[in-house]
Amino acid sequence: MSTTVAPTPRWALRIAGITRRSPTLAIGATILLVFALVAILAPWIAPFDPIQAQPRNVLAPPGGAHPFGTDGNGMDVLSRVIAGAGWAFGIAIPAVLVGLLAGVPLGLYTGYRGGWPDEIMMRGFDALRVFPSIILALAVVAAAGPSLLNVVLVIGFLDSPVFARVVRAEVIALRGSTFVESAVAAGNPTWRILFVHILPNAIQGAMAQTAVRAAWAVRISATLAFLGVGIQPPTPEWGAMIRQGAEYLVTGQWWVGVFPGIALILMVLGLNMLGDGMQDMLDPRRKAATR
């Protein structure tokens, strides 16, 4: 009696192919998938309310009902680490979108136009590079106020030059191409040439940068919170939790800061690995160099 083996689904073959071509991308995507599931399921899997203080359980060590212990306010550290995943995504994704929306059109236009607009943009970016990004972020957020919106906007606009430079370089390489000259000869307006003909061919480099820049956004937002000018307690943000935990390291309550620190490291690692894998997959020059 013969048995019929069901064919492997196409999506599974596609995932297997990507894993073979870029194990780094697969590992990074797996780490992020775990964090995404944790963020989505946080209301159901967190054992306690992440901002509920329990005065009788202040600085309880890991174990029992509190596997990660409690902090100086008696809040469950595990619940706060779980909730912190949602805040990390809630900062990184909008910040990257702001950077893309601000940087891509700027790089697209100045790269195609050239001349004084391009020169002004490049000199402005050079001036920004003189100051460390964290110093600029500290100054702007401290002046505007430590709200989630301000943190996202500041990180996004500080990140926009990266996307603008990448797109500008691609546009400069493409603007002399035959298909662009044909579009110009056909009488297409500039906006159509930019967004219909050039952008689809110039956006890959910027998209390959999104995961890496999301990792940078997570680090900067955590740094701002650690320094006291970002998201403020009792919000379960990992940087703010690490700041609180640093106060207790010297007295032996290591769990308050260590567990959110591990979560932060793993998410940044996953984003960087995903970004590196995306660059290998989308950039033909890197792909050829790694063969």
Image: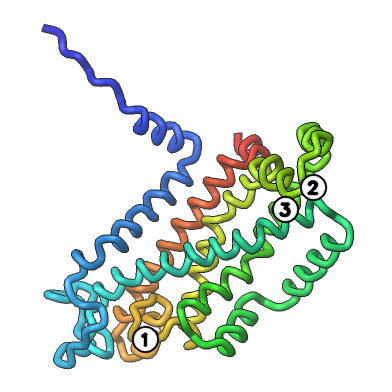
- Circle 1 residue: 233
Seen from the viewer's position, the closer of residues 1 and 11 is 11
As helix, strand or loop, the secondary structure at mark 3 comes to helix
As helix, strand or loop, the secondary structure at mark 1 comes to loop
- Circle 2 residue: 172
For image coordinates 32% across by 55% down, the residue present is 34
For image coordinates 40% across by 82% down, the residue present is 240
| Residue 246's disc number | none
Give how far apart the Cα atoms at labels 3 and 2 are: 9 Å
Q: How was this image coloured? A: rainbow
Q: Mark 2: few, some, or many residues within 10 Å (few <14, many ≥20)?
A: some
- Locate residue 218, reporting x and y percent: 48, 68
Give how far apart the Cα atoms at labels 2 and 1 are: 46 Å
- In the figure, residue 188 lies in which quadrant? top right
Q: Amino acid at mark 3?
A: Leu
For image coordinates 62% across by 45% down, the residue present is 204
Seen from the viewer's position, the closer of residues 50 and 70 is 50
Locate the N terminus by quadrant. top left
Seen from the viewer's position, the closer of residues 242 and 13 is 13
Locate the C terminus by quadrant. top right
Left or right relative to 206: residue 198:
right
- Locate residue 36, reporting x and y percent: 34, 58
Above-or-below relation of 171 to 146? above
Q: Residue furthest top?
A: 1
| Residue 108's disc number | 3
Q: Mark 3: few, some, or many residues within 10 Å (few <14, many ≥20)?
A: many
As helix, strand or loop, the secondary structure at mark 2 comes to helix
Pointers 3 and 1 in contact (C-beta within 8 Å): no
Q: Amino acid at mark 2?
A: Ile
- In the figure, residue 2 lies in which quadrant? top left
Seen from the viewer's position, the closer of residues 218 and 247 is 218
Pointers 2 and 1 in contact (C-beta within 8 Å): no
